[in-house]
Image (spheres, helix red, strand yellow):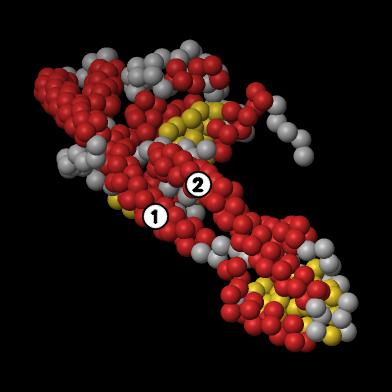
Amino acid sequence: MRLLPATLWPRFLKRRLPTSLWGRSLLIIVLPVLVMQVAVTWAFFDMHWQTVTARLSDGLAGDIAWAAESYADDPTPQNLDVIAERAQRSMSLSIALQEGEVLPRDRRRGAIGVIDRTLEKALKARIDQPVWFDTTRYPAYVDIRVQQPQGVLRIIAPRERAVATQAHIFVLWLLVATVLLMGVAILFIRNQVRAIERLAEAAEAFGRGEPRERFKPSGAREVRAAAQAFMNMRDRIQRHIDQRTALLASVSHDLRTPLTRLRLELALAPPFKRAEAMRGDMDEMEHMIDEYLAFARGEAGEPAQEISIAGLLTAAGEDARRAGAEVEVSAPEDLTASLRPLAFKRAISNLAGNAAAHGEHVRLSARPLPSGGLEIAIEDDGPGIPDDMHEEAFRPFSRLDDSRNQNHKGVGLGLAIARDVARGHGGDITLERSDMGGLRAVIRLPG
C-alpha cells in the first residue's frame, strides 16, 4: 500500500470530511469525546488494571509456590492433606494430586492476552518446576498445574485472585456517561442546525418565487440575527419587486391607451399606402410592452401545479409550427412536474419561438434525470450562437451579431425571461451546439 505524499493529506482528508454543518458539528463533538475516552481507557488499563492484575498474579504465584515446595519437602498423603486444608482455609485454593499424570501439551489462551502473559510471567518467576495453566475452561476459576515426581499437583484458584475482575464496571460507567453526554450534545446541535436549515429553506423558497409566511427565528443569537436580517431583506426586495411591477403595469396601461386610439384611428382612416406598415409597427409596440411587463413580473406570485410536460411541449410546438417551422416533439406521456404553468409555458414558448425564427426544423424533447430531476431540450438547425457568446445571449436587451439575431420582433428579453423562470424553479438554462447543426437550449430542473 502506497502512502500519500504529505502535501496531499490535507486534500485527501478534506474530501472525506462531512460537508454539512450537522455532520461537521457532530464531528467536532464526537471526535474529541472519542479521543478522550480512548486515552482514559488506555491509561486505566495501562496504569491501573495491568498493575493490579500483575500484583494479584504475583501473589497467587507465591501461594502456589509455597504449596508446591511444601509438598516437595514431604510428598506424603498426610502432608498433602494438611497443605490442602490450609490452602483452602487461608488462600481459597483447591489442591489435589493427580498421581502418575503429566502436564497437558496443548495450551489455550484467553481473549485478553495480557492476563495469560502476566500470570505466566509470575508463575515462571516463582516456581522452578514445569507449570501449565488455563484461564478459559472455568469462567470463575483458574486451573493451574505443577509437575511433581509423583504426578501433577493441580490447583484450582478463584479468578479474582489472578485478575482484577471488576474493571469492566469502570468501562461500562464510562460508556454510559459518554452516551448520555453525547446524546445531550447531539440534541443541542440538532436544534441549532435545524434553525439554520429553516433559514436556508426560506431563502431557497424566496429564490424560487414561492410565497412563504414569516417564520419565527430560533436557535443561537447569531442565527436569530441572521434570520431576522434575511426576513427584513426579503421584505425590502419584495417591496421593490411590487413597486417595479406596479410601475411597469401602470406604464403599460398608459401606453396601451394611446396605442388603442392610434389603432382605432388607423382602422377608421381611408386606405393609404403605409397602413399595413403602421399596423405592423403597432403590433410590435404591443409585443414589446408585453415583454417588458412579463420580464418585470415574472409570474412570481403564480402557484405551482402538477402539469404534463408532454402537453406543455406539444402546445409550444404548435406555436412554432404556426411560425413556419417543422416541429418534432418527444416526451414521455406520464412525465409530470410541479411548475408554475403560465411562467413555464412562457419560457418554453420563448425558446421554441426563438428556434422557429432561426431554423427550419425544431425539436422539443424531455426526459427524467437519474437524480430525480427533469431535462427539457429545444433544438434547431439554424446558424447557432458562438460558444463565447452563450452567456451574453441571456443578458436582458442583449442583441447578438447578424449571424443569429433573436430580436426580429422583440427587445432581447426572450432568453432572459426563460432563464429567470428556470432559476425561479430552482434550475437553470444552458446553451450548447445541437447535433442538428444549430442551437440547443437545455432546461434542467431539480427533483
Q: Is residue 89 left or right of residue 377?
A: right
Q: Residues within 10 Å of mark 1 (few under 14, many from 20)?
A: few
Q: Is residue 25 left or right of residue 275?
A: right
Q: Is residue 12 above or below residue 334?
A: above
Q: Mark 2 = which residue? A: 40
Q: Position of residue 204 (x, y in %)?
A: 32, 37
Q: Position of residue 260 (x, y in %)?
A: 14, 24
Amino acid tagged 1: Ala
Q: Which quadrant is home to the N terminus?
A: top right
Q: Is residue 230 above or below residue 197?
A: above
Residue at 41% over, 14% down: 399
Q: Earlier in the sequence, mark 2 or mark 1?
A: 2
Q: Of all residues shown, which one is farthest toward the top?
A: 401
Report the front residue among 256 and 422. 422
Q: Closer to the observer: label 2 or label 1? A: 2
Q: Residues within 10 Å of mark 2 (few under 14, many from 20)?
A: some
Report the front residue among 391 and 54. 54
Disc 2 on helix, strand or loop?
helix
Report the front residue among 118 and 191. 118
Q: Mark 1 = which residue? A: 177
Answer with the quarter of the image where residue 241 lies: top left
Answer with the quarter of the image where residue 100 lies: bottom right
- CA gap between label 2 and label 1 equals 13 Å
Amino acid tagged 2: Val
